[in-house]
Image (cartoon, rainbow, N blue to C red):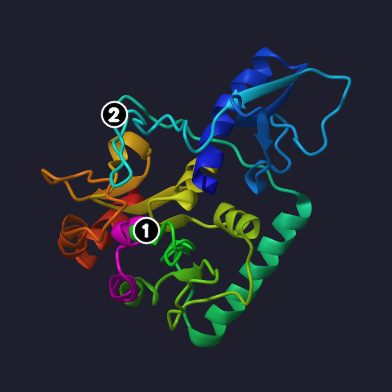
């Protein structure tokens, strides 16, 4: 599962820990008797590190794994198409940072401000954390899914060119990121540092996915591209601006082939539409 999935379970884990404070809460697969570790859960007081459990305290395993995700109707889903559980509604999760992680994020933000001052004479209005593509976009197993979910590099460039003169934009960097001129791209950034930078930002802009759940956990404003692959009614948050292609074929959940419907979504959701949602997010 991805980081977004790992964040989704944290709110439930907090409830279980409150009910059973003496137990070590772990996440895993009850059928297999296995527990998982995720970087998302670092420093979380409600989730124990399954690699370092105490023998003197009881363990409580939450059954949550790739074949038991509550927003998916696993019985109806197939190898080519995901079917969604329309009754599911996400609850904002929790993410905790160390002092070192916050310090690293502050250092990157300081460098970003120096980049701005070097290239601009006026003050920036807002700090925007931007994600433009999934790290899984070229993964041999998941690439089709993420290509269908993708808004497209050219669209992101056009959007950035509209907002970069007024706002300090920090671009999330990973192995699959395509650099966009005129905005700040750190030399390196791991996921948790990126999350800490988002905590220091005013707005998140990007595709539906892990960082959208991070923004929700941090109670940050966000403008998210949903396309037509999954509906914000299923996996989105009401306090975010969720841009959705509301069509008879939406949400398609296509994972086996490149989807014409998702291509239509990219064309339908224009840069101007995105800009209107950004303006709305700043006003709210």
Residue for badge 1: 146
Which tag, 2 or 1, sits closer to the chain's start?
A: 2
Q: Say which of marks 2 and 1 sits in front.
A: 1
Q: CA distance from mark 2 to mark 1?
A: 21 Å
Pinpoint residue 160: horizontal percent, then vertical percent.
Answer: 36, 73
Q: Secondary structure at mark 1?
A: helix
The relative height of residue 55 versus residue 213 in the rendered view (above or below) is above
Quickly name the residue at label 2. Answer: 86
Task: Please state, as top left, top right, bottom left or bottom right, where the C terminus lies in the image.
Answer: top left
Residue 140, quarter of picture = bottom left
Image coordinates of residue 134 in percent, x first then y, are 44, 61
Residue at the image point whose x is 39% and y is 75% from the top? 164
What's the residue at 54%, 47% (across, down)?
Answer: 3
Q: Main secondary structure of the magenta part?
A: helix
Q: Position of residue 264 (x, y in %)?
A: 15, 60
Camera-nearest residue between 160 and 127: 160
Residue 146 sits in which quadrant?
Answer: bottom left
- How packed mark 2 is, by other alpha carbons closer than 10 Å (few <14, some 14-19, many 20 or more), is some
The answer to whether 170 is drawn above or below residue 86 in the figure is below
The question of residue 148 being in magenta is answered with yes
- Name the residue: 59% across, 54% down: 195
Neighbourhood count class around disc 1 (C-alpha, 10 Å): few under 14, some 14–19, many 20 upward = many
**Extent of the magenta region:** 145-159
Q: Nearer the viewer, residue 92 or 60?
A: 60
């Amino acid at each position: 599962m991805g980081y977004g999935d790992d964040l989704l379970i944290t709110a439930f884990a907090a409830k279980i820990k409150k009910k059973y404070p003496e137990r070590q809460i772990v996440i895993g697969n009850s059928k297999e008797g296995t527990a998982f570790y995720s970087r998302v859960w670092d420093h979380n007081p409600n989730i124990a590190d399954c690699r370092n459990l105490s023998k003197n305290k009881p363990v409580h395993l939450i059954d949550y794994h790739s074949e038991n995700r509550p927003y998916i109707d696993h019985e109806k889903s197939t190898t080519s198409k995901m079917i969604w559980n329309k009754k599911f509604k996400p609850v904002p999760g929790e993410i905790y940072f160390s002092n070192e992680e916050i310090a690293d994020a502050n250092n990157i933000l300081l460098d970003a401000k120096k980049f701005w001052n070097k290239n601009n004479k006026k003050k920036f209005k807002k700090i925007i954390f931007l994600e433009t593509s999934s790290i899984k976009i070229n993964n041999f197993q998941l690439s089709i899914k993420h290509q269908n979910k993708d808004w497209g590099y050219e669209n992101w460039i056009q959007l950035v060119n509209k907002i970069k003169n007024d706002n300090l934009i920090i671009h999330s960097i990973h192995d699959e990121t395509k650099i966009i001129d005129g905005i700040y791209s750190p030399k390196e950034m791991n996921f948790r540092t990126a999350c800490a930078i988002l905590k220091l930002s005013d707005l998140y802009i990007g595709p539906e996915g892990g960082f959208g759940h991070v923004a929700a956990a941090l109670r940050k404003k966000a403008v998210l591209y949903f396309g037509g692959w999954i509906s914000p009614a299923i996996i989105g948050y009401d306090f975010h601006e969720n841009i959705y292609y509301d069509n008879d074929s939406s949400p398609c959940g296509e994972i086996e082939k490149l989807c014409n419907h998702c291509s239509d979504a990219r064309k339908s959701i224009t840069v101007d539409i995105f800009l209107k949602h950004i303006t709305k997010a700043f006003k709210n």
